Amino acid sequence: MIIGKFTQQDAVYAGIIYGIGFNIPYVVFSPVPAKHGDSQPDFVVFGAPSEEDGEFELGAAWAKTSKAGKPYLSVKLDGPALVAPIHGALTKQQDGSHALVWNRKEAKADELAEADAAA
């Protein structure tokens, strides 16, 4: 299920998350400036009610490559409003935009990226 749409501007992804019981109209995947080790995320995900309002940390994302050789971001969103963390994949679409794809079961992000690429 697609729960977000994003555009890429340099190393930053900006967009919206919707359809999971609430909407977050301003979401940014911001690169981590000095990554140390594979367990540290490549991006921190921030959300805000609008561009002018204060942002809050919403999750993290790791750069991965699917078995088919396509790059994607493995995303984990979490917060007090969520019953459980949301796992998904941010994948590039044919029109150049990026879609945040979520699956309720905790499937491997690699599988999510490949399923989205086939759609």
Image (cartoon, rainbow, N blue to C red):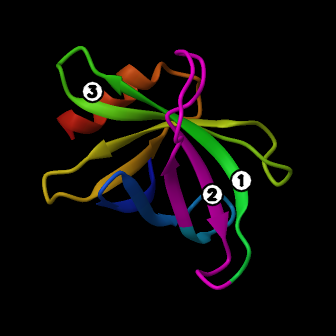
- The circle on residue 46 is 2
Residue at 53%, 34% in the rendered image: 34
Residue lying at the far front of the rendered structure: 34
Looking at the rendering, the stretch of residues picked out in magenta corresponds to 27-52
Asked which quadrant contains residue 97, the reply is: bottom left
Which is more toward the observer, 105 or 117? 117
Tag in front: 2 or 3: 2
- The circle on residue 114 is 3
* Residue 80, image x, y percentages: 86, 50
Relative to 50, is 103 above or below? above
Relative to 100, is 9 above or below? below
Residue lying at the far right of the rendered structure: 80
Q: Element at badge 2? A: strand
Residue type, label 3: Glu
* Residue 41, image x, y percentages: 56, 30
Residue 16 lies in the magenta-colored region: no
| Pointer 1 with pointer 2, Cβ within 8 A | yes
Label 1 belongs to which residue?
Answer: 57
